[in-house]
Image: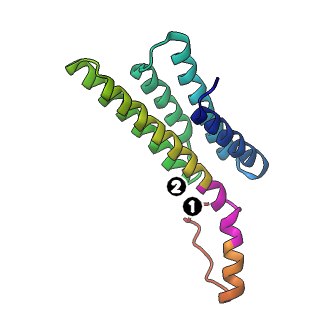
């Protein structure tokens, strides 16, 4: 039986993948598929080996995901998602260094998983913000604002889209 958080993750992944496929850009699709592949690689490794905290594996897989996402990022949203992966790499190395220096501790293991879970959900929050900004609610709000306030000066070309 899958845990509720795993089911929620799969549901969020499915919805965001569908949005990226239907109305997104190639960078959006690359990003969401990288997030999913990263999760499959990490969860699969834990299930296959039985090691609940393979921090070296997590750091390696997260580094690869970070490099894939940050390869010619489409803007600030995609760069933020890549930066979150960099944060996960740092968290993994801090956890590993702590275990090497002081030995394994169930409390630090819990904190490690909690931090990785929170960063994982932060990926989805950033991705959802990116999709909304890319023509979802962001453009609807702009249309309402134009109707209420009149024309607005055009944005510069450097604004993240």
Q: Which mark is residue 160?
A: 1
**What separation in Å lies between label 1 and label 2 (alpha carbons)?**
6 Å
Residue located 57% across and 61% down the image: 160
Residue named by callout 2: 76
State the image coordinates of residue 103 (x, y, percent, origin top left): 24, 17
Residue located 36% across and 26% down the image: 109
Name, please, the residue furthest toward the left: 102
Q: Is residue 151 above or below residue 36?
A: below
Between 7 and 157, the residue placed more toward the observer is 7
Q: Is residue 101 above or below residue 148?
A: above
State the image coordinates of residue 95 (x, y, percent, origin top left): 32, 28
Label 2: how many Cα within 10 Å (few below 14, some 14–19, many 20+): some
Local SS, label 2: helix
Residue located 46% across and 42% down the image: 118
Name, please, the residue furthest toward the top: 49
Q: Is residue 157 above or below residue 122?
A: below
Quadrant in which residue 97 is drawn: top left
Quadrant in which residue 10 is drawn: top right
State the image coordinates of residue 87 (x, y, percent, origin top left): 40, 39
Residue interval drawn in magenta: 129-140
State the image coordinates of residue 39 (x, y, percent, origin top left): 57, 29
Quadrant in which residue 142 is drawn: bottom right
Q: Is residue 127 above or below residue 5?
A: below
Q: Quadrant of the N terminus?
A: top right
Residue located 65% across and 67% down the image: 138
Contact flag, marks 1 and 2 (Cβ < 8 Å): yes
- Answer yes or no: is residue 149 visible: yes
- Answer yes or no: is residue 30 visible: no
Relative horizontal placement of residue 62, taking residue 32 as reference (left or right): left
Relative horizontal placement of residue 71, taking residue 20 as reference (left or right): left
């Amino acid at each position: 039986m899958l845990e509720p958080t795993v089911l929620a993750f799969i549901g969020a992944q499915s919805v965001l993948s569908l949005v990226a496929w239907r109305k997104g850009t190639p960078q959006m699709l690359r990003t969401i598929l990288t997030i999913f592949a990263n999760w499959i690689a990490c969860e699969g490794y834990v299930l296959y080996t039985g090691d609940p905290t393979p921090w070296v594996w997590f750091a390696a897989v997260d580094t690869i995901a970070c490099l894939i996402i940050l390869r010619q990022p489409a803007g600030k949203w995609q760069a933020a998602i890549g930066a979150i992966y960099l944060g996960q790499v740092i968290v993994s190395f801090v956890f590993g260094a702590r275990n090497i220096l002081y030995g394994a501790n169930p409390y630090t293991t819990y904190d490690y998983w909690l931090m990785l879970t929170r960063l994982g959900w932060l990926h989805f929050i950033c991705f959802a913000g990116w999709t909304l900004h890319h023509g979802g609610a962001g453009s609807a709000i702009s249309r309402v604002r134009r109707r209420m306030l009149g024309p607005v000066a055009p944005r510069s070309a450097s604004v993240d889209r």
